Image (cartoon, rainbow, N blue to C red):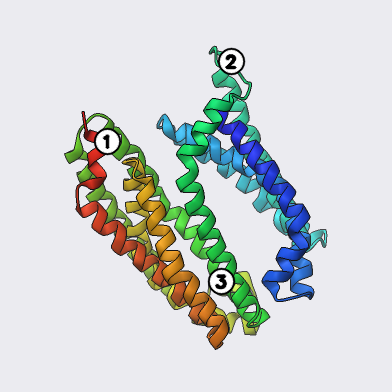
Amino acid sequence: MQATWLAVALGVLLAALFQVLAGPLTRLMAGGPGPVAEAAEQWLRVASPGLPLLLVALAGNGWLRGVQELRRPMVFVLAGSLVSLALCPLLVHTAGLGLVGSAVANLAGQAVSAALFVRTLAGELAGSDVSWRPRPPALRAQLVLGRDLLLRAAVLQVAFAVAAAVVARSSTAQLGAHQVALQLWLFLALVLDAYAIAAQTLVGTALGARRPDEARHTAVRVVRWGLGTGVVVAVGLLALRPVLPGVFTDDPAVLAQAGVVWWFLALMQPLAGVVFALDGVLMGAGDVAYLRTVTLGAALLGFLPLSLLSGWLGWGLPGVWTGLTLFIVLRLVAVGQRVRGSAWLGESVTP
C-alpha cells in the first residue's frame, strides 16, 4: 500500500514538472525550436499525466514479485499493452492524430494496467487490518531503500536523453533510425530482463534461507540462459536485418541509417543477456549499492563521454551506439567480477 502511495506522489510530481518544462526540455534536446521540438512537446504534454499510472503499475509489479507471484503482473501489463497496441494505429492513422495519438494510446494502456493492480491491492487489503492511509515512516523507509535504484535509473535516463539530443542535432533521419533501434533495444532488454527477475527472486530466497551455494548455482544458470538467449536474439536480428526496419518506416534515409546501427543492436545482445542476468543476481543479494556505483561509473566514463564526443566530432549515430556498447561492456566486467567473488554473499548469509 505504501509503495502505491509513493508511486502516486512521485508520478504526480514528475507529471507536473513535465507539464511546466515540456517546451524548454524538448527544445534543449532538439537543439532549438523546430518541427521535432514542437512534436515532442505535444507528445510529452499528453503523455506525462500517465506517469502516476505507470509508477503504480511498477509498484504493483514489485510487491507481487516480492511474494513470487509473477503470473498476474504479466497478465495486467499485457492487458494494458494490448489496449495501447490496438488504439495506436487507430488514433495515429485513422483518426489522424499523429504523434499525439500514440501518447493517448499509451495513456489508455497505462490506465488499464494501473486499474488492475489497484483492484488486486484492494482485494489483498480487504481481508487484512492494513490501513489504506499513507504512513510517513514507511514511505521514508522505502525512499531510503530505493534511493540507490532511483539514482541508478535517473543517471541511466539522463545518459539516454543526452544520446538522443546528440543524434537529434545530426539529422532527422539519424534520429528516426536511433528511435527505431532504441525501441527494439528496450524491448529486448525487457525480454532478457526476465532472467534478472527470476534470479532476483531465487537468489533472494536462497540467501534468506542461508544457502549460498544454491545462490551461486542459480547465478551460473541464469548467466547461461542469458548468454544463450542473447546469442539467439542476435542471430535473429541479423537474419531479419533486410526486413525488420521496414516494419517501422518506409523512409529511405531512415532505413539507410538503421542499417548502420543494426550491427550494434544485434552484436550487443549476448553481452546484454549476461549483464541483465547478473544484475538480477546482485539485486536478489541486496547488493544494490554496488549496482548503483557500477551503473554510474559505466554511464559517466563510457556512455556519456562518447555521446558528447560524437556530437562534437560529428560521429553521429555510430558514435552514440559505440558509447552504449561500451556502457554494456563496462557493466559486464564489473558485475562479472563481483559475482565471481563472495562479497555479494556476505551480508545476506551472516548469522
State which tag comes first along the sequence, 1 or 3.
3
Name the secondary structure under disc 1.
Answer: helix
- Residue at 39 percent across and 44 percent down: it is 197
Q: Is 143 situated above or below 176? A: above
Quadrant containing the C terminus in the rendered view: top left
State which tag comes first along the sequence, 2 or 1.
2
Name the secondary structure under disc 2.
Answer: helix
- How many numbered circles are shown? 3
Q: Identify residue for label 2.
A: 126
Q: Identify residue for label 1.
A: 348
338 or 43: which is nearer to us? 338
Whether residue 152 sits left or right of residue 31 in the image: it is: left
Q: What type is the residue that disc 2 sits on?
A: Ala
Q: Identify residue for label 3.
A: 163
Q: Residues within 10 Å of mark 3 (few under 14, many from 20)?
A: many
Q: Residues within 10 Å of mark 2 (few under 14, many from 20)?
A: few
